[in-house]
Image: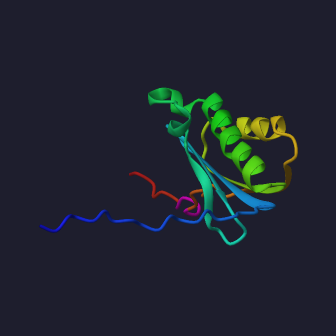
């Protein structure tokens, strides 16, 4: 009989990420807040929704949940990858927009150098003149 050999896989080498500059995309909706941290080229480094911090159901849409999520993502980036400068791009009309700034101000050592609003605004032109009813 031939004994079965145990397969060995090569261990993955950890990438040594240095991220002095990053872009923080904040998408706030009525039901959730999603924060994504990318590098200069747009590759996702960290992020997720408020569910990864432990909020479930209707508590996901609260401003406090948005603050806790932002703190979690930026703490990891600052401590692990050396994040120093940040661009912020907002999208959506949720409650957590102001609380994201509060979270960034609570963390020392991260400078905001650019803020952009990317919420799409509906535009269809002016309404036409209605014909008179006779």
Residue found 59% across the figure and 29% down from its top: 62
Q: Residue 29 at x, y = what percent?
A: 54, 43
Q: Quadrant of the N terminus?
A: bottom left
Coloring basis for residues: rainbow
Residue at image x 60%, y 39%? 94
| Above or below for 111 versus 60 | below
Q: Position of residue 8 (x, y in %)?
A: 39, 65
In this view, the residue in front, 2 or 17, is 2
Quadrant of residue 45 in the image? Answer: bottom right
Seen from the viewer's position, the closer of residues 122 and 79 is 79
Question: Relative to the observer, which residue lies in front, 134 or 35?
Answer: 35
Q: Is residue 85 magenta?
A: no
Q: Position of residue 108 (x, y in %)?
A: 87, 40
What span is in magenta?
A: 124-128
Residue 132 in sight here: yes
Image coordinates of residue 55 in percent, x first then y, are: 52, 30
């Amino acid at each position: 009989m031939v004994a079965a050999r145990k397969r060995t896989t090569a261990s993955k080498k950890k990438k040594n990420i240095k991220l002095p500059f990053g872009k923080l995309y904040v998408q706030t909706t009525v039901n959730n807040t999603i924060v994504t941290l990318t590098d200069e080229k747009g590759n996702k480094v960290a992020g997720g929704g408020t569910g990864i911090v432990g909020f479930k159901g209707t508590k996901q849409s609260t401003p406090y949940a948005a603050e806790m999520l932002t703190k979690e993502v930026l703490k990891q980036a600052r401590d692990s990858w050396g994040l120093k400068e940040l661009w912020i791009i907002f999208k959506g009309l949720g409650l957590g927009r102001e609380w994201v700034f509060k979270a960034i101000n609570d963390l020392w050592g991260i400078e905001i150098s650019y803020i952009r609003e990317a919420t799409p605004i509906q535009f269809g032109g002016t309404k036409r003149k209605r014909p008179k009813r006779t």
